[in-house]
Image (cartoon, rainbow, N blue to C red):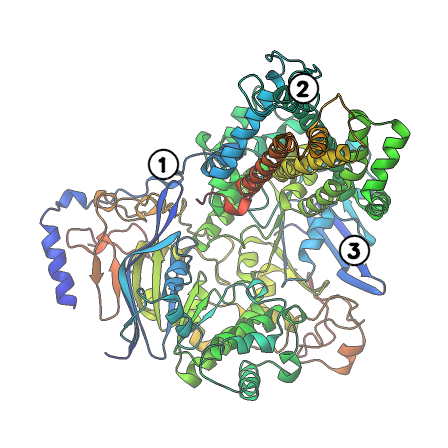
């Protein structure tokens, strides 16, 4: 990343995004709480965290599957909730999503051709006549062929289904794609296939990704910058190399050290930080550092006030009162 | 142990030649091949229906009844209301295959005329119930909110009133006849399908493929018709099959207590009613319509069970 | 040599479906020793779960059936046992931890009751003894406030807690083998680390053998003494964990190791995927199941099934590359032929 922030063209600007679900009287699930970031054109932004941290909800807010409680989301400078019909249509073409579960993300009653082709037809990229040929082209991109076009999703393996999902998203020539845990449901040998394919397509089509995952090693591999989330809040945000070399938030440190390393000798040597307890419920969280309960370094300050996201180094943001002290 | 394996290797190596050991690398064509035969959803369902003997026999029986209801009265020598004072309450014979009733009317013709009425009512009422229920339930499930709440409260009210009272009221207001029978049944009948569809749609709309269609910008109508409805079609057909017998029963019951069709119009309920009056003299007059009601309802239920299994996604690809 | 408590020889297990027979496990042999953690690694559909479930006869029979082979637990044949005899073995001799703690616990029963279920029909314990044992085991698996948890229902517990309860259930009958089928797949990383540590601790304490089934090489590296790599219903390679990772002999194992992104993989580096899709065991290929996806495939590979080649005391590899006629290649480094 040689370009400075001023030169880069912001694609999505998310300001103070909050997404609450009111599940019962007096009970509020704060799925996303005051999240703030910008995605620049051509980059891959990683969003990582454990289940319930709000990473998927954030992604879904960006494609308007949820209407946020407060905060604004701007796409190319315009609030996405104030679109006219024509702008809406453009937005739907330009912003696509790849889903986590390949088994439920394809309509079981539609053939591959219809699944991939319907978006193209909707956005005027193909007509009834040439849709066959266009679908074949895009299937070739993801390593499938003509024979697969008239088959139904259940006939494919998980990896093939996920590639069909990718083909569907890319068929409409979007510029921004949200990848919501696209490989976590796949077999190890297939994960690399899909990752490589996403990278290749990014280069070819100049795509911008928001890559959501719970696996830090994968996120590190594919992302330029990474956001770590915990219980709806952002805890750390930095360039991916910087984040892994120099994690400042205790939660990031724990996450990094918990990854099982596929190297027995290294595992025996590796020192690990273990934390007790489990992720607390996101319902009516206390107004303090969400990680305080499990944090080995927590002080009274952490248990009483919510730490703001501070820029400790250029481009490295941390939400921790004691960051840098340990 | 290791010796042993080595010996085996030696033994088999005899037939091997060195040119079989040249690295040729991956076989790109084989890699993505799918060896299973391709079956569409409907082909697979049909295959399973055929495998289910009870359901298959039921289906054939129902088709047979349907054909007979259409054609039997046309090709009979007797009219359905043609009385014959010389042949009253006769049992089965070559002249009158299913005997005659107390007015000497041919039961074979009357049974199939009755079948027309009973089956029409059953089919129409069940179909209308399904259509109304599906459309309302679909919207309730997809949109939720106020509309959903109002519809659900209406359903609660309808559930609260005994259905017989509703039927009697409709009959009193509109007069008895096929039309008012169907109207009465639809008023009470759509609620079940509506609740059921609402639940299914509610479940499906959070599925990722529906979300994908929303992200793609598909209009709501397309999403419901292309993404959601085909996926509940199987369940709806099953539901419809199961709803027909209850409609037939209800018609028979209402006609039996004198609220439905009135003679000389025939329906299975009417025939059974006439039969009970003559039970001591000519028991066949009750047994014949009762037999057809029973077999039809049984066959429909069996078929419904078979369809439910055939459409069950969990059973796909298994025996 | 005789501390084998489980010996599996030439096991073949298949399922009947409408289109024919799916051969899920094809000629699998291995043994489990006292106090060891044996890892089985492979992709979905490779037969690893079916193999492990065969040991407790948990596969539905029919449509599943044994085509051959034997499973000997302490010298006793498992395959010919009746349902009633199997029930005695399940829980007390061999415990099973399922993949998904969310669905494998009974939602209508309290945690305590489910643990005590294991004792039903086995020996005569008083209710008090049972409860004491259940509380003891809950404490052992690291559940706080066992007295309170004992009366709670599964939905009141978190995911990690439920998995601990599953482990407690598997452990309560003092089994000599625990089969853990992807015990941490549905858990978050921080919780996964806790559960894996717990399993290690239990092994050290009780000398219980653990068969750990997973697709995650990281888990294997951390936990296991010996490893089986399965592919297409067969064992591709088996050996000690160091042999598998550092003296990799089978191209499939090498492919697995090369295809994972680690923290040290830089952004510019390309991952080396295994192209294609695992074979459909509906119609298993004639030769080596991996042949179509293997970068070292030879004509022989798609004609004949590879034999087992013993490379060391523990290390066995089923690959034609080990044959004397085959060119010498390094499966880890790729195509450079070493002469």
Give me the residue at 55% from left, 71% from top. C163
Residue topped by disc 1: B29
Q: Residue furthest right?
A: B173
Query: Along the horizontal axis of the image, is C55 left or right of B182?
Result: left
C-beta proximity under 8 Å, tags 2 and 3: no
Residue C332 in picture, x, y percent from top left = 33, 57
Gap between marks 2 and 1 measured at Cα: 76 Å
The percent position of residue A112, horizontal first and vertical second, equals 53, 34
- For label 1, the SS is helix
Instruction: Answer few, some or many: residues within 10 Å of disc 1's Cα (few below 14, many 20 plus, some between 14 and 19).
Output: few
Q: Nearer the viewer, mark 2 or mark 3?
A: 2
Other-residue count near label 3 (Cα within 10 Å), few / some / many at <14 / 14–19 / ≥20:
some
- Which residue: 22% across, 65% down? C311
Report the residue marked by disc 2: B104
Q: Earlier in the sequence, mark 2 or mark 1?
A: 1
Q: CA distance from mark 2 to mark 3?
A: 83 Å
Q: Quadrant of the C terminus of chain A?
A: bottom right
Q: Which residue is label 3 attached to?
A: A17
Q: Nearer the viewer, mark 2 or mark 1?
A: 2
For disc 2, the neighbor class at 10 Å (few under 14, some 14 to 19, many from 20) is some
**Which residue lies at the image location 62% right of the left edge and 74% below the top edge?**
C110
Q: How many marks?
A: 3
The picture places residue C197, in percent across and down from the top left corner, at 50, 77
Q: Chain of mark 2?
A: B
- Helix, strand or loop at label 2? It is loop
Q: Is residue A76 visible?
A: no
Same chain under badges 2 and 3? The reply is no
Q: What separation in Å lies between label 3 and label 1 (alpha carbons)?
A: 48 Å
């Amino acid at each position: 990343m040689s370009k400075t922030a001023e030169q880069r063209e912001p694609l999505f600007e998310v300001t103070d995004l909050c997404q609450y679900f009111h599940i019962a009287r007096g009970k509020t699930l704060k799925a996303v709480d005051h999240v703030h970031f910008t995605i620049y054109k051509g980059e891959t932004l990683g969003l990582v965290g454990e289940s319930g941290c709000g990473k998927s909800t954030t992604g879904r807010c960006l494609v308007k599957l949820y209407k946020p409680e407060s905060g604004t989301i701007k796409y190319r400078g315009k609030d996405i909730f104030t679109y006219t019909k024509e702008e809406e249509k453009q937005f739907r073409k330009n912003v696509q999503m790849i889903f986590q579960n390949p088994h439920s993300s394809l309509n079981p009653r539609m053939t591959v051709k219809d699944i991939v082709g319907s978006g193209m037809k909707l956005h005027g990229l193909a007509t009834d006549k040439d849709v066959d040929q266009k679908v074949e082209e895009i299937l070739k991109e993801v390593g499938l062929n003509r024979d697969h076009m008239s088959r139904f999703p259940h006939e494919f393996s998980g990896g093939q289904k996920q590639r069909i999902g990718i083909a569907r998203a890319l068929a409409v020539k979007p510029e921004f794609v949200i990848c919501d845990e696209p490989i976590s449901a796949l077999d190890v040998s297939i994960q690399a296939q899909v990752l490589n394919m996403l990278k290749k397509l990014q280069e070819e089509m100049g795509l911008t990704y928001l890559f959501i995952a719970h696996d830090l090693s994968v996120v590190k591999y594919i992302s330029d910058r990474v956001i770590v989330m915990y219980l709806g809040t952002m805890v750390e945000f930095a360039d991916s190399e910087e984040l892994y070399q120099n994690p400042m938030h205790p939660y990031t440190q724990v996450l990094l050290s918990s990854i099982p390393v596929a190297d027995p000798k290294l595992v025996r040597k590796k020192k690990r930080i273990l934390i007790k307890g489990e992720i607390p419920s996101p319902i009516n969280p206390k107004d303090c550092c969400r990680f305080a309960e499990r944090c080995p370094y927590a002080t009274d300050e952490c248990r009483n006030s919510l730490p703001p996201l501070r820029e400790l180094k250029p481009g490295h943001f941390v939400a921790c009162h004691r960051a840098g002290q340990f | 142990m290791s010796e042993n394996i080595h010996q085996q290797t030696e033994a088999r190596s005899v037939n091997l030649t060195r040119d079989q050991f040249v690295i040729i690398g991956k076989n790109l064509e084989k890699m993505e091949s799918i060896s299973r035969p391709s079956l569409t959803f409907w082909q697979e369902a049909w295959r399973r229906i055929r495998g289910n003997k009870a359901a298959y026999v039921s289906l054939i029986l129902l088709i047979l009844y349907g054909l007979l209801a259409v054609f039997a009265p046309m090709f009979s020598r007797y009219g359905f209301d043609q009385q014959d004072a010389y042949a009253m309450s006769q049992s089965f014979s070559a002249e009158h295959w299913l005997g005659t009733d107390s007015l000497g009317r041919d039961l074979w013709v009357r049974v199939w005329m009755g079948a027309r009425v009973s089956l029409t009512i059953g089919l129409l009422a069940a179909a209308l119930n399904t259509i109304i229920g599906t459309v309302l339930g679909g919207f309730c499930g997809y949109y939720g909110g106020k509309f959903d709440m109002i519809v659900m409260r209406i359903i609660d009210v309808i559930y609260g009133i005994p259905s017989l009272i509703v039927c009697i009221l409709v009959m009193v207001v509109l007069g008895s006849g096929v039309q008012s029978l169907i109207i009465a049944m639809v008023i009470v009948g759509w609620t079940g399908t509506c609740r059921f569809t609402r639940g299914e749609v509610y479940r499906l709309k959070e599925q990722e493929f529906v979300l994908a269609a929303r992200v793609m910008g598909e209009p709501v109508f397309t999403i419901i018709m292309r993404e959601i409805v085909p996926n509940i079609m199987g369940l709806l057909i099953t539901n419809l099959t199961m709803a027909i017998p209850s409609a037939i029963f209800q018609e028979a019951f209402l006609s039996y207590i004198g609220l439905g069709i009135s003679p000389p119009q025939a329906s299975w309920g009417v025939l059974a009613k006439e039969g009970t009056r003559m039970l001591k003299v000519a028991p066949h007059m009750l047994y014949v319509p009762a037999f057809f009601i029973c077999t039809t309802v049984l066959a429909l239920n069996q078929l419904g069970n078979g369809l439910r299994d055939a459409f069950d996604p969990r059973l796909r690809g298994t025996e | 040599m005789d501390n084998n408590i489980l010996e599996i020889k030439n096991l073949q297990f298949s399922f009947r479906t409408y289109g024919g027979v799916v051969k899920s496990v094809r000629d699998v042999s291995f043994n489990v020793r006292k106090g060891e953690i044996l890892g089985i690694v492979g992709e979905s559909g490779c037969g690893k779960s079916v193999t492990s479930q065969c040991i407790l006869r948990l596969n539905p029979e029919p449509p599943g059936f044994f085509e051959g082979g034997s499973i000997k637990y302490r010298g006793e044949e498992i395959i010919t046992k009746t349902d009633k005899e199997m029930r005695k073995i399940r829980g007390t001799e061999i415990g099973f931890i399922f993949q998904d703690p969310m669905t494998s616990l009974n939602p209508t029963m309290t945690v305590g009751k489910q643990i005590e279920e294991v004792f039903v029909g086995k020996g005569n314990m008083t209710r008090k003894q049972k409860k004491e044992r259940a509380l003891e085991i809950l404490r052992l698996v690291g559940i706080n406030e066992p007295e309170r948890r004992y009366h709670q229902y599964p939905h009141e517990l978190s995911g990690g807690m439920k998995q601990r309860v599953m482990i407690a259930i598997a452990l309560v009958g003092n089994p000599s083998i625990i089969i853990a089928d992807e015990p941490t797949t549905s858990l978050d990383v921080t919780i996964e680390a806790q559960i894996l540590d717990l399993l290690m601790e239990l092994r050290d304490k009780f000398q219980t053998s653990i068969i750990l089934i997973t697709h995650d090489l990281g888990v294997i590296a951390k936990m296991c003494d010996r490893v089986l790599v399965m592919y297409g219903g067969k064992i591709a390679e088996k050996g000690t964990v160091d042999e598998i990772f550092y003296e990799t002999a089978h191209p499939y194992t090498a492919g697995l190791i090369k295809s994972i992104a680690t923290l040290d993989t830089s952004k510019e580096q390309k991952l080396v995927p295994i192209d294609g899709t695992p074979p459909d065991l509906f119609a298993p290929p004639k030769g080596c199941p991996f042949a179509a996806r293997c970068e070292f495939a030879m004509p022989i590979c798609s004609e004949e099934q590879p034999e087992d080649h013993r490379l060391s005391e523990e290390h066995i590899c089923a690959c034609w590359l080990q044959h004397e006629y085959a060119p010498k290649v390094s499966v880890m480094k790729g195509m450079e032929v070493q002469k």
